[in-house]
Amino acid sequence: MEVIHFLSIEDVEYFYEEEMIVAGTKGWIRDKFELEACIEAPKHSFNCEYLLDIYGMAAKYITSFAIRHPYSDGNKRVGTICAVVFLEANGIDYRESTETELADVIYQYLRKEIDETGLASHLRTNSKQQ
């Protein structure tokens, strides 16, 4: 299996705390089990092979947080932060052409206009190796 740098629970909790400061709100962990599930979701493998490529894993961070809602507030934001930081930790730069491009794509996913594969495709198209 190739070496992939995944996020730890401490990483995600830090991102969440910082996002709550920026947003000016006070959120909390609503469900620790769901938080752990979100963090583990991109790691799924079978027969020593990851089930998703790096972009699919990044998309899985977004969709897991958006659907599972482990936090009281800011789930889509923290999932997005996780996806972008995860890509960067693995030598990939994600670049938006507009300030809200990724948010718009995530809302397309939530409205079922695209699926998780479409979200991963967007990340792939708008990324490059460092």
Image: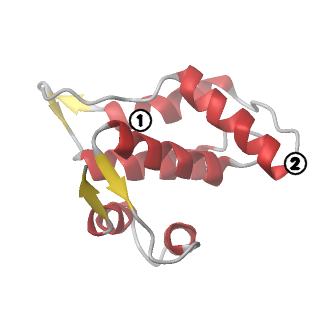
Dot 2, how many residues are within 10 Å of its Cα: few (below 14), some (14-19), or many (20+)? few
Give the x, y percent position of residue 111: 56, 74
Residue at 70% from the left image edge and 29% from the top image edge:
31
Q: Residue at x 66, y 44 (%)?
A: 69
Circle 1 residues within 10 Å: few <14, some 14–19, many ≥20: some
The answer to whether 114 appears left or right of 24 in the picture is: left
Q: Secondary structure at mark 1?
A: helix
Q: Amino acid at mark 2?
A: Gly
Q: Decide: marks 2, 1 in contact (CB < 8 A)?
A: no
Q: Is residue 71 above or below residue 109?
A: above
Q: Between tags 2 and 1, which lies in front?
A: 2
For the view shown, which residue lies furthest in the front direction?
Answer: 130
Report the residue that reaches farthest toward the right.
25
Q: Position of residue 27 (x, y in %)?
A: 82, 38
Please identify the quadrant where the N terminus is shown: top left
Give the residue at x 60% y 44%: 68
Identity of the residue drawn at 26% across and 46% down: 54
Residue 2 location, x and y as percent?
14, 29
Earlier-in-chain disc, 2 versus 1:
2
Left or right, residue 58 beside residue 61: left
| Applied colour scheme | secondary structure
Residue 24 is tagged as: 2
The mark found on residue 90 in the picture is none
Looking at the rendered structure, the kind of residue marked 1 is Ala
On the image, numbered disc 1 is attached to which residue? Answer: 41
Distance from disc 2 to disc 1, alpha carbons, whole Å, reads 29 Å
- In the figure, residue 18 lies in which quadrant? top right
The answer to which of 52 and 93 lies nearer the viewer is 93
